[in-house]
Image (cartoon, helix red, strand yellow):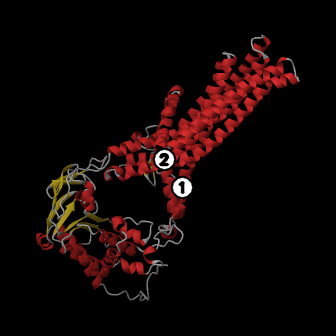
Amino acid sequence: MGRHATGGPASAGHDELFGRGIRLEGGRTRHEGAGTRTGFLTMARELPALVAVTARLGREAAPGPLAAVVAAEVVAGAATAVTLLSTYHVLTPLLAGGPSAAGLLAAGPAIAVLSAAAAAASAARAAGTAAVSRLGPAIERRAYTRLLEHAAGTELAALEEPGFHDLVESARQGTRATRLVVTGAVQLLGGLTGLVAVAGVLGVLHPLLLPLLAATVVPKGWSAVRAARARFTSAKRNIELTRQLEVLSGLLTRPDVAPEVRAHGAGRFLLGHYERLSGTAEREQARLGRGEARLALAGDAVSGTAVVLTYVTLGWLLLAGTVPLAVAGTAVIAIRTAKAGLLNLVMSVNQVYEQGLFVLDWEKACREAAGRALRSGDVLLPARPVEIRADRLTFAYPGQERLALDGVDVRIRPGEIVALVGANGSGKSTLAKLLTGLYLPTSGEVRWGGVPIGRLNRQGVFDRVALMTQDFARWPTTARVNLTIGRAEQAADRDRLWWAGFESGTDAVVSGLPHGWDTLLAMQFLGGTDLSGGQWQRIGLGRAWFRNAPVLVFDEPTSALDPRAEVEVFEKVASLAAHGRTVILVTHRLASVARADRIYVLDSGRVAEHGTHDELMRAGGPYAEMYRLQAAQFDRAAAAPPDRHRPAARGRVAHRR
């Protein structure tokens, strides 16, 4: 009990809450240790590629603002060069013969040019800031939209693959990072143009000053890039740790689990684990901070030494008469300008490199998602209902050797009610997803109308299906959208909405809502409300009815309904089949499948037996055994005498407020 409170791990490499350790598997830590393996020159070569990805997005999303930003920074850099050269031309007459009106007059044109250059630089930076405010959001929106498009178009099995899911999570961070990369890239461009301008001026003044300037710049850039790589590697290594902290914080604050957290005293247990994991995250941040401090100290030491050598060299050149006083003065100003710009350059290198690596993950996720896109043929289904068949069907989930389905044969004629029954994990829901094209088989074939599903237009198959799974979506939208989202193009059809609401019993739920169909079903938003499990199930059924598809798949459609409502729903399902619709029913409640035209009993991914209810009962196999067990439970409950010591229930047992 004490260990639960403190949240200590059960053993090394094992986490009490989440099973395996909190670090990702080797194949999913592509960047782990890269900071220590990659040299500075290699990282410097990677920087243009990081910026190029964002620049391509900028050309697509907002080419005008992108061009304005580049132009503004080029103008600002040119203005810096003009300012420094003008400074030299101002100092030359002023220092030539001492302070005099003639010297000041001779410096007048250079002062005017210097003032104009400063004004141009200020205007360019203002224009660049305005352009960045348009460019950043446009790029982020474009990146997020593209990622969502790819994610929505991938095979379902691929999206459920843990490694790909982690990549998508990193890519989501990459979409947010695009805006930071834009800001950093603008600063980087400004810093580079400024340094180029300073270098050009120093090269004109004296070639020996150029290597000294480089010696002051490179060490700081080296330490910044190394620190950025270390932070990125740490973030990649601890994605699961971050996700686990989010899960725990959600469990401690979510309303749907709050009753059990309080009744079972689970809050202390979860909080102990949160403190343990957050302590790990805190120690990791402290480790990174110490490493960054060491890198910064090394960079500052080398850079500071180079600055001292630069000033010593300037003094020697001045004393030797190699450079005049005006050149030395301009060089001092140029070096101070370079040092001031260097801070922005270092910060931008830091930001662009660190966030740019996540942008590369975004690009990789989009590329891999495109490779995992829904495979679709070009054969269109006929308008009439067709037969669905599965022949020697096998299926294994990605990364798993065990077959979820093995050698399954199923036949579903138009207008039939076909039930898939079996124990938990027997493959019922997986088979339903294969029959409707959500998964593609590992081997064997699913045919619609005699055509393998891989040759059919998959979207055309999906258009024929209405799906209600046991974990159906509870959309945080209005009640109206919750029903019509499956046929959004028909959302304005009031007659269709009325029919779906009446047939599913959703109208009774909606009539009790404060704003009827326009009530927001999301407690997390102001003015929103929530429903009971049974009410939500009515909403899910209404969604299937509104879709009005030829093939309906119901996976445990009445698990939250009372017996009377359950009977009513199955009566409606039977009427749908009587009107030509095909119904695939996945359920544990065998009393509800007695009217099915065919029942398939699955066991460990195989069809153990199939037939009608009467045929299976006569066979005395697994179905008959399960049916009798369930019937016996009801018989015992009905025959049990009332508990004399228990007071009679009065009124409603629970009331939802």
Q: Vertically, is 507 above or below 445?
A: below
Dot 2 falls on a residue whose secondary structure is helix
In x, y percent, where is residue 36? 51, 31
In x, y percent, where is residue 354? 54, 39
Residue 308 lies left or right of residue 362; in this view the side is: right
Which residue is nearer to you in this view: 205 or 299?
A: 205
In three-dimensional space, the C-alpha distance between marks 2 and 1, rounded to whole angstroms, equals: 28 Å
In x, y percent, where is residue 453? 20, 53
Q: Residues within 10 Å of mark 1 (few under 14, many from 20)?
A: many
Residue 352 lies left or right of residue 113; in this view the side is: left
Amino acid beneath label 1: Tyr
Q: According to the image, label 2 marks what residue?
A: 175
Identified at 51% across, 48% down, the residue is 138
Quadrant of the rendered image containing residue 603? bottom left
Q: Earlier in the sequence, mark 2 or mark 1?
A: 2
Identified at 46% across, 50% down, the residue is 144
Q: Is residue 71 visible?
A: yes
Q: Which mark is residue 274?
A: 1
Dot 1 falls on a residue whose secondary structure is helix
Which residue is nearer to you in this view: 498 or 645?
A: 498
Q: Is residue 351 visible?
A: no
In x, y percent, where is residue 309? 71, 19
Amino acid beneath label 2: Thr
Between circles 2 and 1, the one closer to the viewer is 2
